Amino acid sequence: MMTQEENRLLTEIGPATPCGEFMRRYWQPAALAEELPAGGAPLPIKLLGEELVLFRDSEGRPGLLALHCSHRGADLSYGRLEDGGLRCIYHGWLYDRSGRCLEQPGEPAGSTFHTRIRQTAYPCEELGGVVFAYLGPGEPPLLPAYDFLTAPMDHRFVTKLFQDCNYLQGNEGNQDPVHLSYPSDRSRPDPRRGPGGDLPGQGQEPDPPQGPKRRR
């Protein structure tokens, strides 16, 4: 049985947590490529405890920025895709996919203040119908060219599932081979099962609908 401290060590994956810092050293799936069509709206996501916005620039390249604008904290998922980046709809600050601030329309002409602003940004790569992001320090490692990522489109199926649990809870069942031999083993006697092997309420045909009775 894990202690509370051990549980926190393994399950907390936000910024500045031990497990979170470990996971940030690896590419993480951020979204399906089909969720981010060319010219489509920016996509708000939450990855490793961080609120982020995913978008495609004018060249179709995915970019991942911190969700809230560096100026007044406006939600960039409501921003506009224009002029090579993502423009905040509050005051028009424009960011490229590397987090550089390209324009600040409210500043005086000739101002260079925009050159001192950097929005938090993370590298992205697209492979196998998935957009991956690297949230760690330094240069990202090579994205592994696994067979399931490099297979032709007609040889792969990409999907996305939502699980309302911690990542560790989801993976615990995946890495537990013993439990598979019990829920799916019908050779073991179960006093609740009927002659056909069905549990109560299973395998029963519903009664046919009854029409109105006629008097004779």
Image (tube, rainbow, N blue to C red):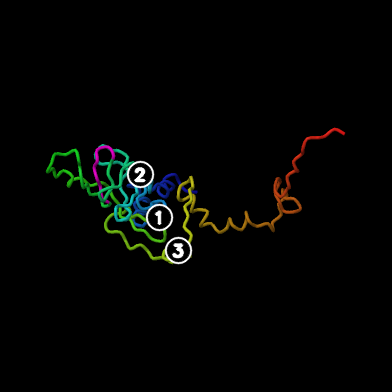
**Percent from the top left, x then y, of residue 28?**
38, 55
Give the crowd class for mark 1: few <14, some 14-19, many >=20 residues within 10 Å: some
Do the CB atoms of the residues marked 3 and 1 lie less than 8 Å apart?
A: no
Q: Which residue is denoted by mark 2 in the rendering?
A: 51
Secondary element at image label 2 = strand
Amino acid type at image mark 2: Glu
Amino acid type at image mark 1: Ala
Q: Label 3 to label 2, Cα distance in Å?
A: 31 Å
Residue 92 shown in magenta: yes
Amino acid type at image mark 3: Met
- Taking the spot 44% from the left edge, 44% from the top edge, the residue there is 4
Viewer-proximal residue among 144 and 72? 72
Q: Which mark is residue 33?
A: 1
Q: Which mark is residue 147?
A: none
Q: Which residue is denoted by mark 3 in the rendering?
A: 153
Name the side, left or right, on which 71 lies relative to 195. left
Q: Label 3 to label 1, Cα distance in Å?
A: 12 Å
**Percent from the top left, x then y, of residue 189?**
71, 54
The magenta-colored residue range is 89-96
Q: Label 1 to label 2, Cα distance in Å?
A: 19 Å
Query: Across the whole image, how many numbered discs are drawn on residues?
Result: 3
Viewer-proximal residue among 149 and 77? 77
Residue 33 placement: quadrant: bottom left
- Taking the spot 37% from the left edge, 54% from the top edge, the residue there is 23
**Percent from the top left, x then y, of residue 67?**
32, 43
The C terminus, quarter of image: top right
Please name which of the two marks, 1 or 2, marks the residue nearer to the observer.
Answer: 1
* Badge 3 or badge 1: first in the primary sequence: 1
Do the CB atoms of the residues marked 3 and 2 lie less than 8 Å apart?
A: no
Name the side, left or right, on which 161 lies relative to 26. right
Our reading of the magenta stretch's main secondary structure is loop
Secondary element at image label 3 = helix
